[in-house]
Amino acid sequence: MKIYLSILLVCFALNNAESIESKIIHNIENEVITNIDIKNEFKYLIALNNSLKELDKEKLLNISNQSIIREKIKKIEILKNFKEMVLNEDYYELLLKNIYTRLNLKSINEFDIYLKDYDLKIEDIKTKITIDALWNELIVQKYNSKIVINETKIKKEILKNSKIQSKEYQLAEIIFEVTSKEEIEKKYNQIVKSINDIGFENSAATYSFSESGKIGGDIGWINENSLNNNIKKNISTLQIGEITKPIILSNGILVLKLINIKNSEANIDIENELKKAINYERNRQLNQYSKIYYNKIKKNLDFNG
């Protein structure tokens, strides 16, 4: 109910001629979220993922509201664990490049011009990049020792297929939570209905707890040898545009969409494929621990709004 009332307040603030005035919508441990913060998040999410424009305003405001709440909670925890919120300038540039190349832009200048169309500045993006990067670093610090990766098994699988022409899949993901096995089918059917109504990208932004949700769930091209057998099996029967049945992970449920497929070179770079496979599995596990830790700290926060 609180979230619903907050959204009504935001809708009123954004549509009211006097909405220039800042109004506090949430207060989390004395970190306030205003109607202007939510409006800026609204613009930011659309800039990253243009397909969100297809959503009705109230639904997009709800996504923006939840997104800025997550960001503020992460910021609070970061400030408890780091002396300052700053990244190395070279690292900034790399992360910015990852964003603008995904938008098919060629330079930071093009990105700056692009952002101006959304009334945003590079500095706005840098703040968000900093929070995301330091949060990821925090999760690595706390959970890296818990990551379990069988490199021998992965390498064996890659070697077995190294002389055979393999496939590469362009994938998008939605990762969601359930509290019981009985809830899996119900939540999956809800997501399938959403995909049919508003598309996979918008559904990822709405339902996925993965950071990829901000960009429509896109996780790029992945060689089939980099995937575990369970995921590979679920993907192998798909036609382009289709989605998998729910794939049960240790701390969440995964739904994948096959965007495209291509044949890979028969003689693959073993070490490179091994590195990619390990990174994929490591990031998958860290993403799950990120959600666990986020939920844990959220429960203990003084949250008004």
Image (cartoon, rainbow, N blue to C red):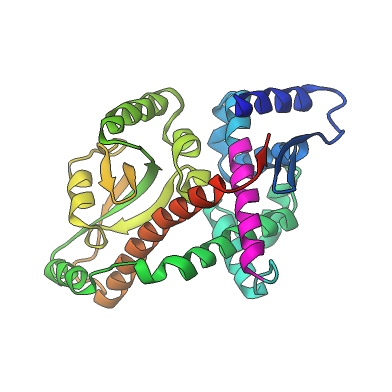
Hey, which quadrant is residue 38 in on the image? Answer: top right
Which quadrant holds residue 281?
bottom left
Question: x and y percent of residue 205 in the render?
Answer: 50, 38
Residue positioned 27% across, 53% down in the render: 262
Corner quadrant of residue 85: bottom right
| Foreground pick, 47 / 125 | 125
Decide if residue 117 is on the left or right side of residue 233.
right
Name the residue located 67 percent from the left edge and 73 percent from the top edge.
89
Q: Main secondary structure of the magenta part?
A: helix
Tell me if I can see residue 39 in this picture. yes
Answer whether residue 297 is magenta in the image. no
* Residue, far bottom: 271
> Measured along the vertical axis of the image, is residue 56 above or below residue 152?
above
Q: Is residue 24 left or right of residue 5?
A: right
Which quadrant is home to the N terminus?
top right
* Residue ID at (77%, 38%): 36
Give the extent of the magenta segment. 64-82
